[in-house]
Amino acid sequence: MLRRLFHRSSNISFRTSEMMPASQSLLSTLRKKTGYAITNCKKALEMNDNDIEKAENWLHAQAQSQGWAKAAKLQNRSTPNGLVGIMLNKKCAAMVEVNCETDFVSKNEKFQSVVTQTTGVCFKKSLETVLSSDVLQETPIIRLGFSSEQLGALQLNNNSDSKLSDFLALNIGLIGENMAVRRGAALCSTNSNIKFASSTHPEQVLDGSSLGKYAAVIAYEEGQVLSEQAELIEIIEIEKLPKQLCQHIIGMNPQSLEKEDNSSDEEETALYHQEFLAHPDYTVREVLDHVGWKIKAFLRFECGETVC
């Protein structure tokens, strides 16, 4: 992809003065380090007097400018497909939706890498926010939300000049389809009693992130058993339960933990009152009471869904 991106561009200016021939050893090093076509690496070294650092910066600048140009041309194209990525640890679980034009590209390794890296950026920012926040003194769970613009402004790494929006534009140029970082969210806590679990569907794991068209995260707390049931002892597998709860949220799409009144309509969309997908003879509340757990919060993303 990197090679094709450069070969498509013919509008590159050159100095008219005599250029120093590219050093073969530096050429090999630059090619291996950047992955760009050898002809472009040669041009970069010649134009920068064999200064490998300047040559690398020149290559990246050329790729970035072409990526932004491509992104500008494609910006009005619809992006109904894509993937949701999740990354979590003991303190935080972050979720991001990245969209593309076609389902074919959503299965592309390069696009999946974009989703993974974008999820990592959101996760890092969420964790930094929590660790520097005083809000946790008042509540055990912090819920964070990120708009497309907020995500695009985040630093890709420790280089303050490298933004997530630049990274996305570069990859739009490489992949050739419009893409958008649509939204992000996170659940975080420094309370050691709070645990996080997640699931995606269909599930794929790449570089520490879980990817899928559907995704769910729960923050839960283990506590005292409220109502142990003999029948459930035989069928509930504690080690599988966190993932099963996330799969239930993906499948049943609850809108809240509890219903606010006695409405039967609300009961259908309140998590605790729904029949548990893994064992439909019991409600989610009955299963949680049996093991002594409480779900403190949950997140659910469906790629391409309408967001109110």
Image (cartoon, rainbow, N blue to C red):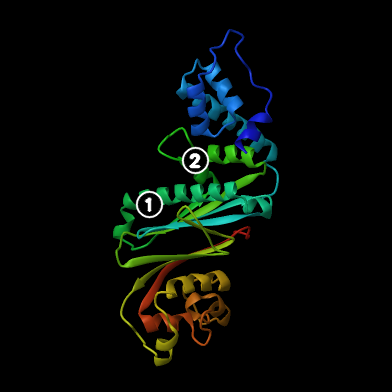
Pick the quarter of the image with the N terminus.
top right
Amino acid at the residue labelled 1: Leu
Mark 2 and mark 1 lie on one chain; the one further toward the N terminus is 1
**Rendered location of residue 141, percent (x, y):** 37, 62
Q: Which residue is mark 1?
A: 127
**Label 2 Cα crowd, 10 Å radius (few <14 / some 14-19 / many 20+):** few
On residue 96, which mark appears? none
Q: Residue at x 55, y 27 (%)?
A: 59
Amino acid at the residue labelled 2: Ala
On residue 153, which mark appears? 2
**Above/below status of 36 relative to 273:** above
Q: Nearer the viewer, residue 13 or 125?
A: 13
Residue at the extreme bottom: 230
**Above/below status of 113 relative to 60:** below
Q: Mark 2 and mark 1 in contact? Answer it, CB < 8 Å.
A: no
CA separation in Å, label 2 and label 1: 17 Å
